[in-house]
Image (tube, rainbow, N blue to C red):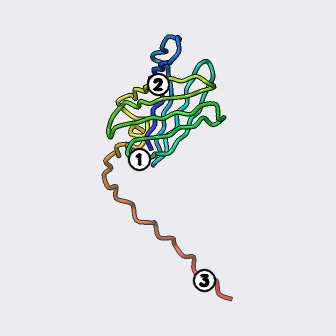
Amino acid sequence: MEAWNEAKLDVGFYDDQRALLGLKCSVRVVASSLSISCLFLEEEVALHGLRNGQGHYHMVASNGSMQATLHRFKDSQILEGFWTRRGRRGFWRIQLPEVALAAEATKAPARKKTTAVARAAPKKRKRSPAIAA
């Protein structure tokens, strides 16, 4: 799994609206699925999609309000594609940070070197003499 919480989203429109640049979004890639969460046109949108070919994703919003495509070349930090939402159309681009959260989280902490410590042999208990009956 790879995850980025500080990805930057640029959104372009085919109508007269000015492009939105540098919006914050979260991106998660797990096996062949891609999930994106962002504030899109003043509404929190969560999109999910499966890989359809090498680096191609077809995305659908969890509430059905938006459909999109995204493409990512192998080892690229950029995803690009097109979107449609409630009759509007446009394109978008996501710039991923250089380091994924998963890469940081999966690094095993360095183990401290320990030296062997000799254990003291257990003390022998003194047996009390048997009581004659």
Per the model, the C-alpha gap separating discs 2 and 1 is 20 Å
Per the model, the C-alpha gap separating discs 2 and 3 is 93 Å
Q: Residues within 10 Å of mark 3 (few under 14, many from 20)?
A: few
Identified at 51% across, 72% down, the residue is 126
Q: Secondary structure at mark 3?
A: loop
Identified at 39% across, 61% down, the residue is 120
Name the foreground residue: 39 vs 49: 49
Q: Secondary structure at mark 1?
A: loop
Which mark sits nearer the N-terminus, 3 or 1?
1
Quadrant containing the N terminus in the rendered view? top left
- Residue under pointer 3: 130
Q: Residues within 10 Å of mark 1 (few under 14, many from 20)?
A: few
Pointer 2 with pointer 3, Cβ within 8 A: no
Q: Secondary structure at mark 2?
A: strand
Pointer 2 with pointer 1, Cβ within 8 A: no
Residue 64: image x %, image y %?
A: 65, 35
- Residue under pointer 2: 91
Residue 35: image x %, image y %?
A: 52, 38
Identified at 55% across, 26% down, the residue is 38
What type is the residue that disc 3 sits on? Ala
The quadrant in which residue 107 appears is top left
Name the foreground residue: 131 vs 116: 116
- Residue under pointer 1: 53
